[in-house]
Image: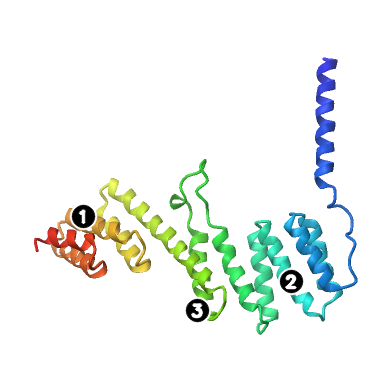
């Protein structure tokens, strides 16, 4: 029993020592520089090594001690980036939105707007292997990402972040299309064909041009066939030819129409 207690005590002491080592360098006030830009640089270095507490202290010091310098505006953005790096997305979003309200004509306002939109995109559920696929999860953040990225692209058409924003928007549209396909498949397994039609028509209307378009169109055709709606089934094949011209899918649709 004494040996067991000794082992446990040793483990506790080792753990405490490890925690102390882990937190070393994060306690106390940093050695601030007299120059605002130098403190920004020191904060960046702390952020790079994931010393979030020290980085926050440097940025806050600049923001409060040099309120009339441009470095203070930079520190506001850095504090948003800090929260983003910590995956504290709502807090990061609030900081970026506050920057936009306070500095609507600032040269980096598009950066704040893009980073704000990106907080929704970064907060989208992932395909972690222990969890259900993302297409089965709640899509609230995905929809928010779609709206915020679309708004950014419309409001800042000349921003340097536009190409990346468009790329992320397409990823978001695909995620939402995958969700609609998943729900349509769920209803198809239960032979609820009207619900299948509703979901697939919504997918094709709201998220056109994704790589799921071909599958969605042919699944929609099958659903209309199941509903004995021959007119809509034929129109769906015509849509395949119209929307995917010159592709094997269009040729397949022509064969199915008997032409």
Number of numbered markers:
3
Percent across and percent down for residue 187 are 31, 50
Q: Residue at image x 83%, y 37%?
A: 16
Q: Secondary structure at mark 3?
A: helix
Q: Residue at image x 69%, y 69%?
A: 95
Percent across and percent down for residue 226 are 18, 53
In the displayed structure, does residue 164 sit left or right of residue 81? Answer: left
Mark nearer the N terminus (3 vs 1): 3
Specify few, some or many for label 2: CA neighbours under 10 Å numbering under 14, 14-19, or 20 or more.
many
* Residue 245 to residue 14: above or below: below
Task: Give me the C-alpha separation between circle 3 and circle 1.
Answer: 37 Å
Q: Are marks 3 and 1 in contact (CB under 8 Å)?
A: no
Percent across and percent down for residue 180 are 37, 57
In the displayed structure, does residue 243 sit left or right of residue 111? Answer: left
Q: Residue at image x 82%, y 81%?
A: 68
Task: Give me the C-alpha separation between circle 2 and circle 3.
Answer: 25 Å
Specify few, some or many for label 1: CA neighbours under 10 Å numbering under 14, 14-19, or 20 or more.
some
* Mark 3 or 1: the one toward you: 3
Q: Secondary structure at mark 2?
A: helix
* Residue 30 to residue 20: above or below: below
Residue assigned mark 3: 154
Query: Could you say which is closer to the camera, residue 116 or residue 33?
Result: 33
Mark nearer the N terminus (2 vs 1): 2
Q: Secondary structure at mark 1?
A: helix
Residue assigned mark 2: 76
Res. 222 mark: 1
């Amino acid at each position: 029993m004494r040996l067991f207690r000794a082992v446990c005590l040793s483990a506790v002491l080792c753990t405490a020592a490890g925690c102390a080592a882990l937190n070393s360098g994060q306690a106390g006030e940093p050695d601030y520089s007299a120059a605002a830009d130098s403190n920004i640089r020191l904060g960046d270095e702390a952020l790079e090594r994931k010393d979030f507490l020290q980085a926050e202290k440097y940025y806050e010091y600049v923001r409060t001690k040099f309120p009339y310098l441009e470095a203070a505006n930079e520190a506001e953005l850095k504090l948003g980036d800090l929260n983003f790096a910590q995956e504290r997305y709502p807090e990061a979003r609030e900081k970026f939105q506050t920057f936009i309200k306070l500095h609507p004509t600032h040269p980096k306002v598009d950066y704040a707007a893009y980073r704000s939109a990106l907080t929704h995109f970064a907060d989208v559920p992932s395909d972690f292997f222990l969890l259900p696929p993302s297409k089965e999860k709640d899509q609230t953040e995905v929809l928010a990402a779609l709206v915020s990225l679309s708004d950014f692209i419309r409001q800042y058409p000349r921003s340097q972040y536009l190409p990346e924003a468009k790329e992320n928007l397409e990823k978001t549209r695909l995620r939402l299309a995958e969700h609609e396909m998943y729900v349509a498949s769920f209803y198809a397994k239960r032979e609820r064909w009207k619900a299948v039609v509703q979901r697939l028509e919504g997918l094709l209307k709201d998220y056109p041009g994704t790589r799921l378009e071909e599958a969605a169109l042919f699944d929609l055709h099958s659903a209309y066939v199941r509903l004995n709606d021959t007119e809509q089934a034929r129109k769906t094949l015509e849509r395949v030819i119209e929307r995917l011209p010159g592709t094997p899918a269009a040729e397949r649709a022509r064969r199915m129409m008997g032409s």
